[in-house]
Image (spheres, grey):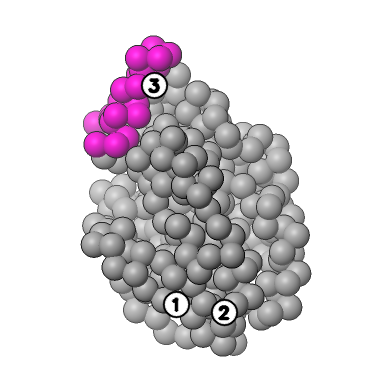
Amino acid sequence: MNRIREGRVIWTNPFGGRRHETSLRPEAVAAVVFWSKDFGPLISHLDELDRRGYRIAFQFTITGLPSVFEPRSPETSRATATARLLAERYSPDAVLWRYDPVLISSLTPPTYHVKRFAELAAALEGCSHRCSFSFPTFYAKVVRNLSRLSAETGVTCENPPFEERLELASRLAEIAAQHGIELHACCDDSLVRGPIRKASCVDAELLARLYPDRVGPVAVRPTRKQCGCCESKDIGAYDTCLHGCVYCYANASKETAEQRWRQHDPSAEALV
């Protein structure tokens, strides 16, 4: 919010380390797409954001995974209540549910996800019309954290073959449709078939429908392979989230994130 009030922010490209300045003045911002598992702390600032003229959408991750995987995520009931509040204030189209990642493990087999997803889809019916999902990418840092989890708890994770991923994704799409929700595959075109659509997490077409007075034509500019996002500026930073999810690719470790949190200066021009 300090950056909003000053109208500018400095952010660092994680690939190469180059620093950039981006204007946050309302007239320079077509829309802000927030990403979070917990929008509770943002609620008290919505009046100011609206008053300043920002157009907003929310990528809201709600998986309800066991705490061994997500030790600091909010309770599912609190998260779904927050999603409903946001939908009532803006629009169900502005609340973009993420069931991400679909983590297959000894604790969460495919049958677990079918049941959990059905519970969440029922709870979110009417307050979100779109759900993005993906199976985890096993980057080296993710493998390290999952190996540590296995050593400490005995819980093992796996990367299922394509046929099993497609079968589960198709079942989730059926459940989503029963609750008026479209399922979108994020960065995996092999799963885009039947009712499963390609995800565009920063979706200029959707934003233009929500805010036709502000959002015009924007080029598609993928951030990684098979990404469907349009051109945007990501002002976040790696190793800054305290949720501590073991599958996270944006944190090298929870210790690094905690150290950066302690060093964070809210008055600084950059997050880190």
Q: Is 73 in front, or is 262?
A: 262
Foreground label between 1 and 3: 1
Along the horizontal axis of the image, is 262 left or right of 256? Answer: right
Q: Which amino acid does label 3 sit on?
A: Leu
Percent from the top left, x then y, of residue 14? 31, 58
The quarter of the displayed image where residue 167 is located: top left
Q: Which residue is disc 1 drawn over? A: 22
Q: Which of marks 1 and 2 is nearer the N terminus?
A: 2
Percent from the top left, x then y, of residue 199? 40, 58
Q: Which of marks 2 and 3 is nearer the N terminus?
A: 2
Q: Which amino acid does label 1 sit on?
A: Thr
The magenta stretch is: 140-162
Query: How many numbered marks appear?
Result: 3
Element carrying mark 2: loop
Q: Which residue is disc 2 drawn over? A: 7
Q: Which of marks 1 and 3 is nearer the N terminus?
A: 1
Q: Is 139 in front, or is 170?
A: 139
Q: Residue 149 carries which label?
A: 3
From mark 2 to mark 3, how far is it between C-alphas? 42 Å
User: Which SS does the magenta portion mostly show?
Assistant: helix
Label 1 neighbour load within 10 Å: few <14, some 14-19, many 20+: some
